[in-house]
Amino acid sequence: MESSVELRLYLGDIRQQSSTLLREAGPNGYAIATAIPELVVVLDSHYVGHEHTESVVVHLELAGRGPRAVKIRTYDHAELPVVHARRRSLLEHAGQLQELLERTTGVTVRVDVDELVLEAL
């Protein structure tokens, strides 16, 4: 299953167009990917976990001609319970996106997630 999720991105006061998709990846995982065409930036985040294991997040960061990186983070299940807390994962993805954009643009970035979007997850 794939669904579109709205994130509102601002570089300074300027709104940036973006596209974010959430894709199921089996019973214990999913991916959240955001693309910002004007900036040639993509953040592709994969979340895998189970109630009896730690949660693992892999972020693929692509930024035009700038830095490209794969970052792997491990969370205690209670901190990021992947199977039961997509809203926490979306907020984690939004925070990682903010860091990536600030690093690559040098501008203050704001990523807003509507409360209704979070409740729908």
Image: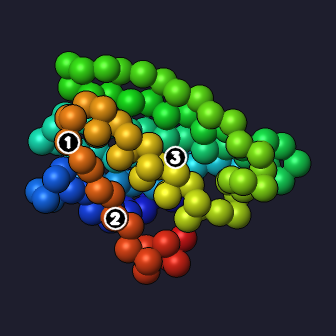
Amino acid type of disc 3? Ala
Q: CA distance from mark 3 to mark 2?
A: 19 Å
Q: Nearer the viewer, residue 71 or 42?
A: 71
Q: Give the side of residue 116 with respect to residue 52, left or right.
A: left
The way the protein has been coloured in the rendering is: rainbow
Q: CA distance from mark 1 to mark 3?
A: 27 Å
Whether residue 16 is visible here, answered yes or no, is no
Amino acid type of disc 1? Val
Amino acid type of disc 2? Asp
Pick whichever of labels 1 and 3 is earlier in the sequence.
Answer: 3
Q: What's the residue at 28%, 39% (across, down)?
A: 102
Pick whichever of labels 2 and 1 is earlier in the sequence.
Answer: 1
Above or below, 70 relative to 42? above
Could you say which quadrant of the image residue 44 lies in? top left
Could you say which quadrant of the image residue 84 lies in? bottom right
Give the labeled residue for mark 2.
112
Q: CA distance from mark 2 to mark 1?
A: 16 Å
Quadrant of the frame with the C terminus: bottom right
Q: What's the residue at 64%, 48% (across, down)?
A: 29
Q: What's the residue at 34%, 64% (across, down)?
A: 112
Which callout, 1 or 3, points to the residue nearer the camera?
Answer: 1
Give the labeled residue for mark 1.
107
Q: What percent of the width, then of the height, locates residue 47?
A: 61, 44
Q: What percent of the width, then of the height, locates residue 60?
A: 44, 30
Callout 3: 10 Å neighbours few (<14), some, many (20+)?
Answer: many
Give the labeled residue for mark 3.
31
Could you say which quadrant of the image residue 111 lies in? bottom left
Pick whichever of labels 3 and 2 is earlier in the sequence.
Answer: 3
Q: Nearer the viewer, residue 9 or 62?
A: 9
